[in-house]
Image (spheres, helix red, strand yellow):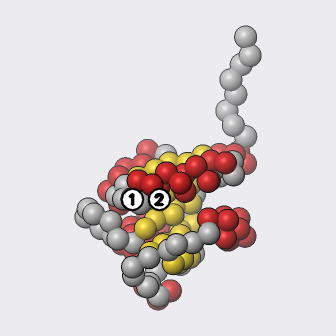
Amino acid sequence: MAKIEDPPAEVQKRSILVVDDEPMIRINLADFFEDEGYQVFEAQSADEAITTLEAHPAIRIVLTDVQMPGSMDGVKLAHHVRDRFPPTLLVVASGAVKVTQAELPSRTMFVAKPFDPRFVLDEIERLS
């Protein structure tokens, strides 16, 4: 019987958390990133995202929508993640709200919805 080994460090660092309250958007993004070799985690709110990040501290990329139900929106989540998990690369997306760079923490990219996930992937890989 073959021994199951831990994935190499390169694979472990390629983890992304997709946060969106719209199930189809979240699932489509999760499928895209899984197809690109990422380990994908999903959350439908900022509160669920924080719980996921605490349970999986190896996550280094968070892609979040701005408008979500719960105790905080995606911009507040981005600031929380930057404070608690500093090395994390952040991508904030919205189809309804235009967020300026001044409103976002450092190492955060804003993309307007709808967006091409390939563009986001290229930017993530460039910034990582």
Dot 1 lies on which element? loop
Rendered image: mark on residue 37 = none
The residue depicted at 39 percent of the width and 59 percent of the height is: 22
The residue carrying mark 2 is: 25
Dot 2 lies on which element? helix
The outermost residue toward the top is 1
Above or below residue 15? Residue 127 is below
Does residue 10 appear to the left or right of 31 in the view shown? right
* Pointers 2 and 1 in contact (C-beta within 8 Å): yes
Q: Is residue 49 shown to the viewer in this render?
A: no
The residue carrying mark 1 is: 22
Residue 70: quarter of image: bottom left
Q: Give coordinates of residue 13: x percent, y percent.
A: 65, 51
Q: Give coordinates of residue 6: x percent, y percent.
A: 67, 32
Residue type at mark 2? Answer: Ile
User: What is the crowding at mark 2: few (fewer than 14 residues within 10 Å), some, or many (at least 20)?
Assistant: some
Residue 72: quarter of image: bottom left
The residue depicted at 39 percent of the width and 72 percent of the height is: 66
